[in-house]
Image (cartoon, helix red, strand yellow):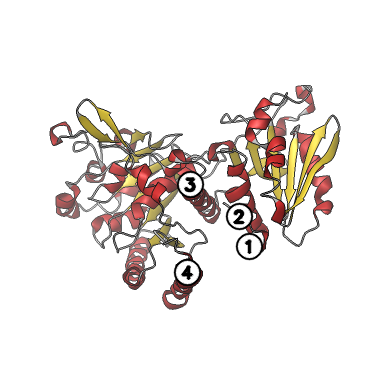
Amino acid sequence: MAFNPELCRNESEVESKLIVQYLLPQLGYTPDTWHQEVAVGSIRLDFLAFAAQVLPFVIDANSPLSVVMEAKHPKQNLNNHFLRIRHYLTSLNVRYGLLTNGKEIKIYEKLGNDVNLVFSCSGKDVETKLEEIKALIGRDSLKNNEPLEKIKPSVIPNSYQVEIKEQYSMKIIAVYHNKGGVGKTTTVVNLAAAIRKKGKRVLVIDLDSQANTTFATGLVKFDDEEFDDIKDSNIFHVLSSEDFYPISEVARKSNFSNPEIYVVPAHIDLIRQESELNALDYSRLILIEKLEEVKNEYDIVLIDTPPSLNLYAKIALIAADYLIIPSDLKPFANQGLTNVKEFIKTINAFRKQIRKSTIEVIGVLPCKISTNARFVQSTLKNRIEKISSRYGVDVMDTVIYERDDLAKCAEKIQIIGDMEIADPISVLDFKPDSTSAQEFQLLAIEVLQKIRMA
């Protein structure tokens, strides 16, 4: 994957296109070994990457070797930011600091009390200089280097002790479109994995009677319905009982990603149980109450919804704080946005009656998008522009393209005796350095920023 500095028009694009999409993967840093927007006392770092990572971490005299990366606007002169990068390295006892505006890349090293420039190149030359950069701040190189000189722990004030996890209230995000086949489930499960790798505790709720998310997260471990262990404890039981089946008991740990996520499964029986739930006065509100009971156990809740206007979709959108609308941007999906907007309007009217604020639409997420160069350069751009102008809905910055890796990670199986059991894993665990994995990393960053958890 090449880097083109001309594509970086602002500081945010330097962060996403140079650091997240290019440098971190090329230098061997997997999503669980780097963190964005880390607050350390009065210092706020753009990126902190670790040669060896343990969560939660504390920056002290025994910290693992690490590198600070700071991004600036392409028009900024990097020399004006040397004092700040020196302050970061000396205050936190970090060995290396990378400073870039996309057009230029500088690497500084802390030696004793001094901080010296040890590498510099232009952004357009980064590919040819990549081995030199790896030798300095590549993850493998840092692992093999001797540690910094030991300093007395008292040198580092208590205010510099930091954990990645910050205190936020639990945020609930529904992923919904009334058009099927737009990549909804793929988005939910891989976004869940990407957010989990950012140190957030994630719960996924499958509210679709097709149970695609339940299958996609590897919870279906039976090959014969006789051994079906989901039919007696799933989302239907959560919704149909006021006093029993709390989420903490029904949610199952899924090793679909590492670290793990938790999933409240669905079952194909949901389709015939809808009328039963409809007869219950509290069915639309019970999920709100049961999520309140686990608000201290999870940071993010992602709800996969059915591609319809049915009860399950209503329950999801009533409970959610935010909405992502995945779309392949094809004509029928685009036309369906009118129905989605009307549905949201109806939901918001109900939310008003129960004293709940209107749902916040994060935006339309382009999904299952063709990688054909001509399509990307012309047709895709036109379709994105039409979403905003014709339907009045914002389009998210991240684009999820249709790639083989996304299909292959979902099709993984394991052999148990004579049976082939589905054993899917997230694309971030299947191929951490793949373009698809990087796209979901960017999506996680964008979502966390827009729900104010970054």
The residue lying at 24 percent from left, 60 percent from top is: 310
- Residue that numbered label 3 is attached to: 437
- Residue that numbered label 4 is attached to: 374
Q: Nearer the viewer, residue 363 or 106?
A: 106
Residue 412: image location, x then y, percent: 33, 39
Query: How far apart are the alpha carbons under marks 4 and 3?
Result: 23 Å
**Callout 2: helix, strand or loop?**
helix
Instruction: Pick whichever of labels 4 and 3 is earlier in the sequence.
Output: 4
**Callout 3: helix, strand or loop?**
helix
Q: Amino acid at mark 1?
A: Leu
- Residue that numbered label 2 is attached to: 17
Tell me the crowding category of disc 1: few under 14, some 14 to 19, or many 20 or more residues within 10 angstroms, Cα based: few
Q: Nearer the viewer, residue 203 or 249?
A: 203
Query: How far apart are the alpha carbons under marks 3 and 1?
Result: 20 Å
Residue 273 shows in this picture: yes
Tell me the crowding category of disc 4: few under 14, some 14 to 19, or many 20 or more residues within 10 angstroms, Cα based: few
* 132 to 155, vertically: above or below: below
Tell me the crowding category of disc 3: few under 14, some 14 to 19, or many 20 or more residues within 10 angstroms, Cα based: many
Residue 209: image location, x then y, percent: 22, 50
> Which residue of the protein is positioned furthest toward the bottom in this rendering?
390
Query: How far apart are the alpha carbons under marks 4 and 2?
Result: 21 Å
